[in-house]
Image (tube, rainbow, N blue to C red):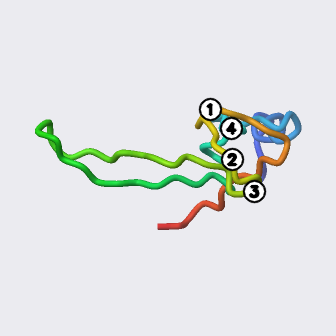
Amino acid sequence: MAKSRQQIAKETQGYIPKFVPKNCSTCEYFEVTKEKRNEGYGDYIKETDIRCGFGNFVVKKQGVCNKHKFKKIKNV
């Protein structure tokens, strides 16, 4: 099947329909401990010990660095 002008233009420009930022929470090195809790308000997941597995230091989910590497997407 032939590509349309729009498809060719999008490929040429490197169009991305949904931007995924390069921040710690999208990084392969991002590590977090998750704990299921229920404290009277229903079940929820508490995240603790949020760290960088590359440099082994505490990070914020929206933090960034030059060693970012996107997580591999698991096919479901």
Q: Are marks 2 and 4 in contact (CB under 8 Å)?
A: no
**What residue type is disc 1 on?**
Gln
**What residue type is disc 2 on?**
Phe
Between the C-alphas of marks 1 and 4, the distance is 5 Å
Residue at coordinates 86% horizontally, 33% vertically from top-left?
Answer: 13
How dense is the environment of label 4, judged by Cα within 10 Å: few (below 14), some, or many (20 and up)?
some
Residue 45: x and y, percent? 32, 47
Answer with mark 3 or mark 4, whichever residue precedes in sequence: 4
Q: Are marks 3 and 4 in contact (CB under 8 Å)?
A: no
Q: Are marks 1 and 4 in contact (CB under 8 Å)?
A: yes
Residue lying furthest right: 12
Q: Which residue is mark 3?
A: 54
Residue 12: x and y, percent? 88, 38
**What residue type is disc 4 on?**
Asn
Q: Is residue 66 left or right of residue 71?
A: right
What quarter of the picture does the N terminus occupy? Answer: bottom right
Residue 74: x and y, percent? 55, 65
**What residue type is disc 3 on?**
Phe
Q: Nearer the viewer, mark 1 or mark 2?
A: 2
Q: Is residue 38 left or right of residue 24?
A: left
Q: Which residue is mark 4?
A: 23
How dense is the environment of label 3, judged by Cα within 10 Å: few (below 14), some, or many (20 and up)?
few
Q: Which residue is mark 2?
A: 57
Q: How many marks?
A: 4
Q: Which residue is mark 1?
A: 62
Q: At numbered mark 2, what does the secondary structure look like: helix, strand or loop? A: strand
Answer with mark 1 or mark 2, whichever residue precedes in sequence: 2
Q: Is residue 74 left or right of residue 43?
A: right
Which of 16/6 is in front?
Answer: 16
